[in-house]
Image: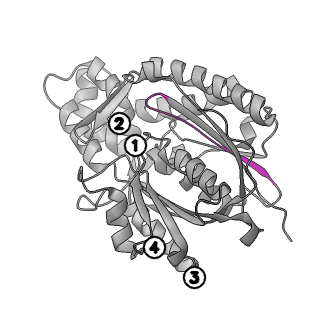
Amino acid sequence: MRPSPPLTQAALVGWSRDLGPDRLASEALEEALAPLLSRLNLPRGLLAQMTGVDYRHLYPADSPTHFGGLAAARRLLADFPDLADKIELHFSTSVGRDFLEPSVASAVAAALGLGPQVRNLDLGSACLGFVDALDLAGRLIEAKALSYALVTAGENSRPLLENTLGRLLGPEATIKDFFRNFASLTLGSGGAAMLLGPSRLHPAAPRLKGAVSLADASSNDLCQGDFTGMETDAAKLLTAGVRLAEATFRAGQAAYGWTADSFDAIVCHQVSRVNTDKLAEALGLPPGRLFKTYPDYGNMGPVAVPFSFGLAWETNFIKPGQKVALMGIGSGLACSMMELEIPPAP
């Protein structure tokens, strides 16, 4: 996609996040997989050692997959009661969905009580849907095609995780099966919501400054899945993803003058330690500026970037007066990068 001209009119008015209440340690997962690990002569501690993921969170089994996004949106709109009626566009970017129709966005909108003026759309791009939705909504606000937009995402990895455990504990599971399903064991659950609006009405809000996105559709088969399971060629996915990220960052350099030192804080899609470290190394990013949530929350899909942004703000990793990068590589393959500018404190 052609880089958008620098943005000046779109801002992140507010945001909220939600977390699955059930905390599951990697040790507990390996305990459940003990028969398989013993049969394959694999050591304990392998999951945390290879991925850096110590914990992930889950919602109850009967929770809708979009529950976290809905919960986050409810808290967000409670903080901006005067703006709910001004929302004209709502993107739901959840990967998991409990039904093929209607749109997940319509179910979330009904539960929120959004009005008939809202166009409710599902926008799917694997783990990058949320970032892409911010970009598209921001461009529409820039063009004065709308005033306010809501973006939500919710993921509940419990069904996929339980199905994966059941399959790996079958008598015919091989070491190849284990590693092809390895990424499924890192998935976490949560929700996020962000409200976008005109920066002229919200001068203290973070501003969207620009975004770039590139695709490598020839690699669409490196990670594929549904609730029954997800299989990943981790090595090829990492190589292809980093290569695509390098090309995307070069596009950002050409369009906006980005350098490896441009950003005070970097929030990237959280997959694992090796993915995060390889991305930082390939782009020359200062490691201390990357905000990492994968050790405690795992890979939360499209929720990861907005969830991590919210947590970074709450913990003062992101501060007023800074430039922030949102980055991600998702199945497809797709890569998106966005620049935010936080106005200085008054």
- Residue type at mark 4 is Arg
Q: Which residue, given by chain and number where applicable, does mark 4 sit on? A: 74
- Mark 3 or 1: in front is 3
As for residue 256 lying within the magenta part, the answer is no
Dot 3, how many residues are within 10 Å of its Cα: few (below 14), some (14-19), or many (20+)?
Answer: few
Residue 246, quarter of the rendered image: top right
Q: Which residue, given by chain and number where applicable, does mark 3 sit on? A: 82
Q: Report the magenta residues as a range.
A: 322-333
- Mark 1 or 4: in front is 4
Distance CA(mark 1)–CA(mark 4): 24 Å
Residue 145 versus residue 18: which sits nearer the camera?
145
As for residue 326 lying within the magenta part, the answer is yes
Nearest to N terminus: mark 2 or mark 3: 3
Left or right, residue 288 beside residue 291: right
Say the numbered circle drawn on residue 187.
1
- Residue type at mark 2 is Ser
Nearest to N terminus: mark 1 or mark 4: 4
Nearest to N terminus: mark 3 or mark 4: 4
Residue 281: percent from left, percent from top: 69, 25
Nearest to N terminus: mark 4 or mark 2: 4
- Residue type at mark 3 is Asp
Q: Do the residues labelled 1 and 2 touch (CB within 8 Å)?
A: yes
Secondary structure under tag 2 reads helix
Q: Which residue, given by chain and number where applicable, does mark 2 sit on? A: 184
Distance CA(mark 2)–CA(mark 3): 41 Å
Residue at x 33%, y 48% (from the top left corner): 96
